[in-house]
Amino acid sequence: MTKQIGFNLFEMNTVGHISHGLWVHPANTRHRFNDLDFWIEEAELLEAGLFDAVFLADVIGAYDGYRGGPETALREGVQIPSNDPLLVIPAMAAVTQHLAFAATFSTTYEPPFAFARRASTLDHLTKGRFGWNIVTSYLPNAARNFGLADEVGHDDRYEIAEEYLQVLYKLWEGSWDDDAVVQDREHRVYTDPSKVRAIDHVGPNYRVAGPHLTEPSRQRTPVLFQAGSSDRGREFAGKHAEGVFVGGRDLQVYRENVADIRRRAEAWGRRGSDIKTYASAVIVLGRDEDDAERKAAEFRRLSSAEGYLAHAGGGGIDLAAYPREALVMDILAAENKAGRDNTHSGRRQYEPTTTVGQALDAVTRFDRGPFFAQGNATQVADAIEGWVRETDLDGFNLRQFLTPGTAEDFVEYLVPELQRRGLYRTEYAESTFRERLYGPGQQRLFDRHPGAFYRGGAHLHDGAAVQRTSEPSEP
């Protein structure tokens, strides 16, 4: 296998992202996430390890479904307290030259005009190293935080997101010409007004006059990521995304889902190769097998079942409220007899002999799924090489157990082995995030991307939109 594999560090501006309970590990520094030095040190480590990017997740609500409130999430540090992911990027960019930054921002509640300026500012400050993970918010608490009684319906969220992207493309790609900024000191003209235009967008959700307040950045539109797994989400990704986080239960399903996303891109007049596909990788590395197992055992010991239950949103039976030796089937039967709603629990099939302790232990398991590897560098590299060969994935988001330990082990043990096999870069060769995906020279969206539809001010006022094609584009 000859293609190089991309790796992003999966992060969040919070104490507890997805490895719940491990903030108490004596080698973990997650409690420093409010300290700017925490992010600076991480950026320097990742650049030294030649990572593609740091990928910053985000939520704009608390996990309050478990036990009817946010208390468990607060106590366990389940993505609360958390801070804005965008604000740490300039500091990380200041101490690096190549590391890219992808941040999550929701299209559901905040209007597009302000985000357009923030994103362009970050692309300027990072010299073209900014990417955006497009999400539609689902937490009921998030809806209440923005004045709504309940969450916006799934399909409605995607309708909003479609118009949101249309507004952003008009601002990023159509509002300013490349040569609008002339900086003519002699004639005292900074920007040529004839090369800047209002967008005057009027749609079902937004009215935006423009013009965009920020001059064109290196990429104009940041690199676009998306992670929706529903049919509507995958259709959205096929139209808009440049990087997609794919799901699946086994390697074959992942391969089918990768192919499906690329077919959808072709149906929108793009190429399958225009989309880079990623999955989450869970890796425990050690000097040898015994060292890796020692680390994994410590992670298992400190993981919090209640933290994972809170993250899952609650519903059904509260396993943590029962003795570990109790049988789950007996509890279900008793609660059903009492008339309590256990539909959520009913979706999970328990063997008759499953105890509460066994069920709770299963909640915290990280050593399952197609992309788990544990051992020394050779063993883990063998696994990763097999994953890519079997699925056609382009890269992985590396889950953290410890900060900075997970990334340090990756850089110290795994990077040299992957480099020896030709599967990992030995130096950075690109200047912008988009060039990292598509090669030197490709700083802007491809001409066939729907965002390019508005370049030069085209179609800003005629109400036209990019339509799905019936035939794939030429290879």
Image (tube, rainbow, N blue to C red):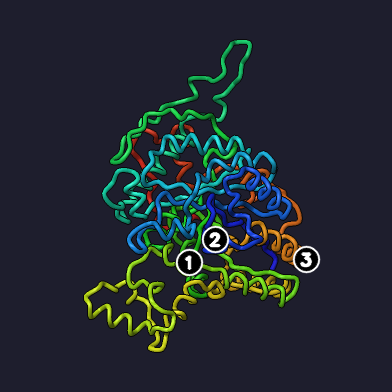
Q: Where on the picture, by quarter, is residue 204?
A: top left
- Residue located farthest toward the bottom when viewing the structure as drawn: 353
Q: Position of residue 158 (x, y in %)?
A: 35, 52
Element assignment for label 3 = helix
Residue that mark 2 sits on? 277
- Of residues 94 and 2, which is closer to you in this image? 94
- Of residues 452 and 48, which is closer to you in this image? 48
Q: Position of residue 310 (x, y in %)?
A: 42, 63
Question: Which residue: 44% across, 26% down?
Answer: 197
Of the residues shown, which amino acid type is indicated by label 2? Answer: Thr
Q: Where on the picture, by quarter, is residue 276?
A: bottom right
- Of residues 223 and 297, which is closer to you in this image? 297
- Residue located farthest toward the front when viewing the structure as drawn: 323
For marks 1 and 3, the one nearer the N-term is: 1
Question: Which residue: 45% across, 34% down?
Answer: 171
Q: Left or right: where does residue 48 sit relative to residue 277?
A: right
Of the residues shown, which amino acid type is indicated by label 3? Answer: Arg
Residue that mark 1 sits on? 247
Q: CA distance from mark 1 to mark 2?
A: 10 Å
